[in-house]
Amino acid sequence: MAQAVKKISRRKKMENIRAYAFMTPALIIIILFTIIPIIGSLVLMFFDYSVVGTTSFVGWDNFVKAFQDREFIIAIKNSITFVVIVPVIQILSILLALLVNQKLPGITVFRTLFYIPVVTSMVAVSIMWGFIFDTQGIINTLLQDLELITQPLGFLNSKYTAMLCLMFITVWQGLGYYMMMYLAGLQGIPQELTESAQIDGANTFQTIFKIKIPLLKPYIWLCSLNSVISAIGVFDVVFVLTKGGPNNATMVINYYSYTKAFGDFQFGYAAAIGAVQAVITTILSIVVFVYGKRGGMTNEE
Amino acid sequence: MRSKAKGSRKKKRIAGKISTYIILALIAVICAGPFIWLLLSSLRTGANIYSLHFSLKDFSISNYTGVIEYMDLGKYIWNTIVVTLGGIIIDVLFSSMCAYPLAVMDFKGKKIIFGLLVATMIIPAAAGMIINYLTISKMHLLNTLLGVILPTSVSTFSIILMRQAYLGIPRELIEAAKIDGAGELRIWATIMIPGIMPSISTVVIFDFIKNWNAFLWPIIVLQDPEKYPLATALQYLNGSFSYKFGYVAAGTIISIIPVLLVFMICQKNYIEAVSGAVKG
């Protein structure tokens, strides 16, 4: 009897060892490069740390410094401005999803075409649009050919239009992704529901606004959240096209934190800026969440 | 009377269809047009590269041969292939191993580990780059392709996706193999892995696109531009050779094509996985 218990416990032990043997390689990488960075950043933000020089604990000094840093305040404002793209991108992609949800010959070809910008690297996309917006680019050439303008417009060099261009590119690239999400949502709506509404005399607009959109609410909530997080974290397009300029017009938090970390090697300060970004993201996410709840956008789960 | 009404309704439906196609075509021009314009521009030389007027006799592939020769694009393509394949191999191997006990074994701490994995998916890890830079430098992997590959290789998304797939394999199969005396490793390799092939292919497509397009982390880790992968090199070329518009355009097209091919071939699988993730 005692021997049998011993045998079982030994078998259990073996099972534990085997399980961890299988998981160890992946767990090492995840702990090293995902979990340690999260904990490490929380520590780093209270230190004055750069690769060279002395390291010292400075408490909240990095944060005090941040909120007296004029450039950082501009970056916060610009990042929050960038969130304006969220409703634009969501509304457009819902419309797009409704459009490609129809049963038409060749519709999958269009879905694929609309999705192409999503799989293309942001570097390629930014370079491409950079050429299009260039002073000698296609838009300026066209406008000059039509004799609408005499001098080429520096879309990316003007503080009034640079940000708008970056927003446009981001919306353009993201549309296909959210379209697919909403398409998945629309295809989950039972057909009987829309059909019976049509039999009851509902027109297309009524079925869209009274049936489809309300049923899409969990998706709208999730996509908006996703979209807010990536809008606050916008980086690639700024990095490739404007580097925060002209005159800080497109300086955003994520890019500022990058320049502080890998331009000036102020790692502690950059970590503090990253923490502020995380707080802003969280606050905005809660706002979306609360609005979602009030609008009845309950999550499926 | 009645047939007339029916006829007009039919006409209306056809008109509706035509206008739908017109709208679809317009949006397609907005989405795919810039790529086509870039492709056409990359095939032209000379000063009129920006102009909208295209004629077939102007086309040449000199920009492509130019960018490959002068900028040594082959080297960057090779770096990208190493980074992309390296990342895929590590992710598929380690994630499929890690997911296996999480799906079928009973062991101490299972809930904690699973919870931890899910948590890392929710927490955005953007700020982690500084610490990862320090870690990679401590490991003496700065300026190496391994340093580029390692931090982003294993993805929790892959682990969770493959765990779901393992759960779908009938338990009887495992039990039968155990009775036949097969060890855990053999069961995993001969029964479980073949059983989750569809999920593995999804992971491969996701990783391919992610790794092929990565550009920021390589800039941070690699000091030597010779070691840059394609996306990073493009960003670099765009900065230093922006006057060679044709070259940069050709390089950009070359960088887009593999991703586009993979996406076109696997789009059904890919799109199902993307939209499945939101349903989660």
Image (tube, coloured by chain):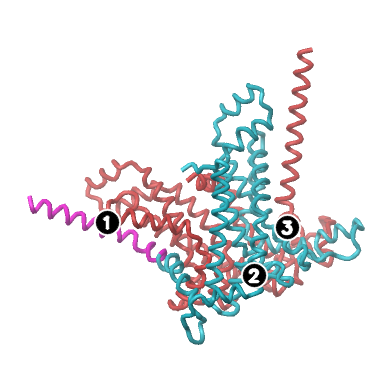
Q: Which chain is cyan?
A: A
- Is B196 included in the stretch rendered in magenta? no
The quarter holding residue A10 reads bottom left
Circles 3 and 2: CB atoms closer than 8 Å? no
Kindly identify which chain the residue marked by label 2 belongs to.
Answer: A
Q: Is residue A267 visible?
A: no
* Residue mark closest to the camera, 1 vs 2: 2
Q: Residue at x 72, y 46 (%)?
A: B27
Determine whether, in the image, residue A54 is placed left or right of residue B32: left
Q: Work out which residue is located at the far left of the displayed protein and give it.
A: A1
Q: Write down the residue under mark 3.
A: B39
The magenta span reads A1-30
Amino acid type for the residue under numbered disc 1: Lys
Relative vertical location of residue B227 with respect to residue B173 in this rendering, above or below? below
Q: Residue at x 71, y 46 (%)?
A: B28
Circles 1 and 2: CB atoms closer than 8 Å? no
Q: Which chain is red?
A: B
- Mark 1 and mark 2: span between their CA atoms? 48 Å
In the image, B84 versus A142, the foreground residue is A142
